[in-house]
Amino acid sequence: MAYDNIAVPDTGEKISFSKGKMQVPDNPILLFIEGDGIGYDIMTASKRIWDAAVDKAYGGARKISWMEVFAGEKAAGVYDGNYMPDETFDAFREFKVGIKGPLTTPVGGGFRSLNVTLRQVLDLYSCVRPVRWYKGVPSPLKQPQDVDVVIFRENTEDTYAGIEYESGTEENRKLAEFLRTELGATNFFPDAGLGIKPISPFGSKRLIRAAIQYAIDRGRSSVTLVHKGNIQKFTEGAFQKWGYELAREEFPEQTISWDEVAADHNGDVPNGKILIQDTIADIMFQKMLLRPREHDVIATTNLNGDYLSDALAAEVGGVGIAPGANIGDEIALFEATHGTAPKYTNLDMVNPGSLLFSGVMMLEHLDWFEAANLITKAYELTIDQRAVTYDFARQMENATKVPTSEFATRIIANMDAV
Ligand code: NAD
């Protein structure tokens, strides 16, 4: 496909799919969106680290060909004021995998969040957030090493569908009238703002399927369905019901439910089986503080997942280091989970960790685990040497504060020592 403002690299091949399986060439073309604010600093530093790790892990036999695509303020400069050009969507449809820095959502003027737009237009229905602790990273927990979960948050439904009717509008009045007279729903005050929370079997099951498949592929031991089904029975409760149903119907050999474990196996999960369990959302926050080892992969609805992802990230170092990805059937977009931190723009100061580890997830997605592991180990060594960016330096004793670029240089140098 021809692009107006995107330069397709001369070297490198497209990632493709054959019978539903991703085919990754040794020299794949991967997309990147630099991001606004601190985007330039963290993307420049992280790309150096990813490239060095691939080079060192495979002795030059594998190499990423980077292709820049645009969104946010940089896009507005290139595309005459357009923050979200169609070409960017086309490039993701064609090349499948990429990574992005944070994007400013312009305030006012009817702009939707660019991040939400990307997820919805490309149907990236799983928001995947691994939460684990790296040795030496400041944490408020006594035993942060016990936290090692991967959250699968549904990305397209729930109150995020944007079906809301403002108090005082004609639409709101019509809907209220319909609810009262046609459905006998009278338990709400006059002039209440009204919102709809759609949760479907299709949307729930494809998310839970992705979570169970991930648990199988990565040798994880359980999938916890997190929901508010005690109160919202036909949305959150249905999510839980459909989750158990899906596990029983599509993964009968690999999974076992908590009820079966209790009834037939004396409470012990049989070897090789993935436990499917569920928890009410509010108690999950407490459990993840007090007994985090009991959870491994989490599958949850959109709003629960939003709260839970940031709360759990805080247990192991905060959003400066928490990575994330938005994944659909074929397209995967990895992303820093924090914002553009405008006051630090171009100061070469901030922590590249969130974007860096989103890239580690991307390497794992390609099955390039050797390069991914090399980065993780070199990162831990660098933290152990107490050379860190300002945000960690102020929480660690005897730390040396280093710029983003130097932090990257030190990680690359440490790759030879691990
Ligand atoms: P923010 O995450 O940009 O910054 C909040 C604070 O967190 C910063 O002031 C800084 O102290 C700290 N911080 C963030 N990233 C850091 C890093 N890598 N290293 C060290 N410290 C870091 O949140 P905000 O100020 O609420 O939002 C600013 C802009 O970012 C807004 O335009 C918002 O729309 C956008 N935003 C984008 C995304 C995204 O692209 N995924 C997410 C959130 C916010």
Image: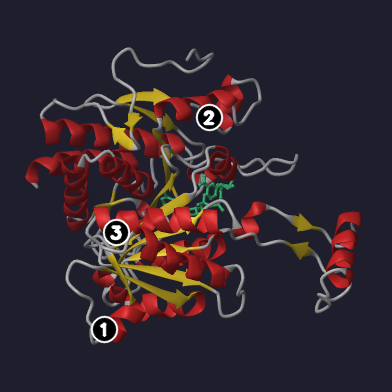
Percent position of residue 317, x then y: 35, 62
Kindly state the secondary structure of the residue where label 3 is placed: helix
Q: Nearer the viewer, residue 320 or 322?
A: 322
Q: CA distance from mark 1 to mark 2?
A: 50 Å
Three-letter amino acid code at disc 2? Phe
What residue is shown with label 3?
215
Q: Nearer the viewer, residue 297 or 324?
A: 297
Three-letter amino acid code at disc 3? Ala
Query: Label 3 near label 1: C-beta < 8 Å?
Result: no
Q: Classify residue 305 as left or right of residue 392.
A: right
* Numbered circle sitting on residue 264: 1
What residue is shown with label 2?
89
Q: Of marks 1 and 2, which one's residue comes earlier in the chain?
A: 2
Q: Is residue 397 above or below residue 209?
A: below
Q: Classify residue 213 as left or right of residue 87.
A: left
Q: Classify residue 162 as left or right of residue 207.
A: right
* Numbered circle sitting on residue 128: none
Please give the name of the residue rendered at 39% of the width and 23% of the height, measured from the top-left corner. 67
Three-letter amino acid code at disc 1? Asp
Q: Is residue 87 above or below residue 258?
A: above
Tell me the crowding category of disc 2: few under 14, some 14 to 19, or many 20 or more residues within 10 angstroms, Cα based. some
Percent position of residue 130, x then y: 35, 57
Q: CA distance from mark 3 to mark 2?
A: 29 Å
Specify the farthest residue to the left: 417
Please give the name of the residue rendered at 48% of the width and 44% of the height, measured from the top-left corner. 344
Tell me the crowding category of disc 3: few under 14, some 14 to 19, or many 20 or more residues within 10 angstroms, Cα based. many
Is the CB of mark 2 within 8 Å of ligand 1?
Answer: no
Q: Nearer the viewer, mark 3 or mark 2?
A: 3
Q: CA distance from mark 1 to mark 3?
A: 23 Å
